[in-house]
């Protein structure tokens, strides 16, 4: 029988930061917060549930957690776990907690949540050392410091987890039941002095690392014929379920485009995207952990297509410049806007030309609210020969492919609508 556990902050605002210098932060925060020792078991094993198609919606976090006295790689057994269910996007979360053995948890979540016919299973895991801190004068805020973070993946029908990455810095998470402006601002001041910066969740960090693991283990080398700019179509949607239906559509060998046999995976990822202005113009900074990828794009050109879709965009794009979060290019530029982007993606190929196209669903959280978009973008071409010079014919063939894929999606799924809205336009910058 499952046991319901009382939660001190069932409705909370959550904020996450990476902390390069935890000692400095803890020293300065000691006048506001004190450490609270719940038990001697301060190593945490957190298992997140999903499946290979990533059918759990963005807004859900379904995880099981247990506490240990020492580090140990995760192994699936029938130990007693705390089941945490979180629902909400961005910083606002509703949380429910139950306690039961792991096998009962798996049965419970598959009986309770029917995201698809594909059962959920223990999918990724994170191990870390956690210290808890509470305010000395109030009870509606908590702070946790996580260190020694390791990330794992559970392959299908395997009890032992595979390590897919680690972090060499600390994480700070702030949970608030209601915004305590006075204390919250003091904590943020100390975080800034300690060189902290916002980051994505541990769950999405694990998904990012899993994507890298999949690409390294199962991917094949390919080159991008049209370097220096991007070509993509944009589709507006309010239904997240259309993504899974779209992937099922391309699992059909009779279509002109199909899932590549060597890489049929759905990948999930997230990033904190900030838009800055400097002497060279507007640029996007994609924050992932302690590194930032700099991307510069030109103005979007609407490509004329034979079907009159008017949702194919072409623009210059220069990316791949990786800098640290405290790089001068970031600190000296003016912040113009930011969003938290969550993404699910799969790839299709044209088997005749071996060109690959990236079909993704983005959920962006920013000051305007929530934006859902599907995109079809040319990724590259798999070949055993050296890359050849770009030609007009190649561009025409790629545009034709994207148009055909986009038209197929629009015909099959009425919940999709052609769009020309870029994320910069959505943010109003």
Image (tube, grey):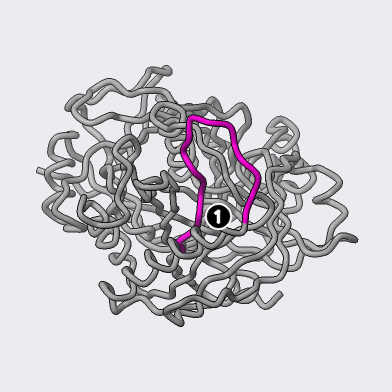
Report the front residue among 20 and 236.
236
Horizontal side, residue 57 vs residue 172: left or right: left
Regarding residue 42, the answer to whether it shows in the image is: no
The reply, left or right, for residue 34 in relation to residue 109 is right
- The residue singled out by tag 1 in the image is 394
- Residue 304 drawn above or below residue 242: below
Instruction: Provide residue 402's location: percent of width, then percent of height.
Output: 45, 63
- In the figure, is residue 132 to the left or right of 40? right
In this view of the protein, which residue sits in the foreground, 217 or 178?
217
Location of the N terminus by quadrant is: top left
Q: Secondary structure at mark 1?
A: helix
| Residue occupying the point 31% across, 43% down | 63
Q: Position of residue 364 (x, y in %)?
A: 51, 65
Name the quadrant of the C terminus: bottom right
The single residue placed furthest to the bottom in the displayed view is 308
Quadrant in the rendering for residue 401: bottom left
Q: Nearer the viewer, residue 397 or 421?
A: 397
Q: Residue at x 71, y 52 (%)?
A: 318
Is residue 337 at least partly visible in the picture? yes
Percent across and percent down for residue 42 are 44, 27
How many numbered markers are drawn? Answer: 1
The reply to whether the magenta stretch includes residue 376 is yes
- Queried whether the magenta region covers residue 126, the answer comes back as no
Tell me the residue at 45%/79% (across/down).
309
Magenta highlight range = 375-391
Residue drawn at point x = 53 percent, y = 58 percent: 341
Please, which residue is most extreme toward the right here? Answer: 279
104, above or below 415, in the image: above
Using a 10 Å C-alpha cutoff, classify the residue at mark 1 as few (fewer than 14 neighbours), some (14 to 19) or many (20 or more): few
Q: Position of residue 200 (x, y in %)?
A: 54, 48
């Amino acid at each position: 029988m499952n046991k319901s556990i009382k939660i001190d902050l069932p409705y909370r605002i959550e904020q996450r930061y990476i902390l390069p210098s935890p000692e400095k932060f803890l020293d300065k925060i000691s006048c506001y917060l004190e450490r609270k020792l719940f038990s001697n078991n301060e190593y945490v094993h957190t298992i997140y549930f999903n499946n290979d198609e990533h059918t759990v919606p963005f807004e859900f976090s379904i995880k099981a957690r247990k506490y240990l006295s020492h580090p140990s790689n995760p192994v699936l057994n029938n130990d007693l776990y705390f089941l945490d269910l979180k629902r909400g996007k961005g910083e606002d979360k509703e949380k429910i907690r139950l306690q039961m053995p792991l096998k009962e948890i798996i049965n419970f979540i598959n009986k309770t949540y029917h995201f698809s016919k594909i059962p959920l299973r223990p999918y990724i895991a994170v191990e870390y050392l956690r210290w808890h801190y509470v305010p000395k004068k109030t009870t509606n805020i908590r702070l946790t410091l996580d260190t020694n973070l390791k990330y794992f993946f559970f392959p299908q029908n395997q009890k032992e987890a595979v390590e897919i990455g680690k972090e060499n810095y600390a994480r700070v998470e702030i949970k608030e039941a209601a915004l305590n402006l006075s204390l919250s601002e003091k904590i943020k001041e100390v975080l800034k002095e300690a060189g902290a910066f916002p980051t994505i969740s541990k769950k999405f960090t694990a998904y990012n690392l899993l994507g890298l693991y999949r690409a390294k283990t199962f991917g094949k080398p390919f080159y991008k014929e049209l370097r220096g700019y991007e070509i993509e179509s944009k589709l507006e949607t309010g239904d997240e379920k259309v993504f899974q239906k779209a992937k099922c559509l391309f699992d059909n060998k009779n279509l002109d485009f199909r899932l590549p046999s060597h890489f049929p995976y759905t990948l999930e990822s997230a990033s904190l995207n900030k838009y800055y202005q400097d002497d060279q113009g507007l640029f996007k900074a994609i924050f992932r952990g302690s590194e930032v990828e700099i991307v510069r794009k030109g103005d979007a050109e609407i490509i004329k297509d034979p079907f009159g879709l008017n949702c194919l965009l072409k623009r210059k794009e220069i990316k791949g410049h990786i800098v640290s979060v405290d790089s001068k290019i970031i600190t000296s530029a003016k912040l113009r806007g930011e969003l938290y982007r969550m993404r699910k993606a799969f790839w299709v190929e044209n088997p005749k030309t071996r060109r690959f196209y990236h079909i993704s669903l983005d959920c962006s959280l920013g000051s305007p609210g929530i934006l859902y978009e599907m995109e079809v973008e040319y990724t590259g071409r798999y070949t055993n020969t050296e890359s050849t010079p770009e030609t007009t014919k190649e561009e025409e063939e790629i545009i034709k492919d994207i148009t055909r894929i986009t038209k197929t999606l629009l015909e099959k799924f009425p919940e999709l609508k052609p769009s020309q809205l870029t994320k910069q336009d959505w943010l109003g910058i």
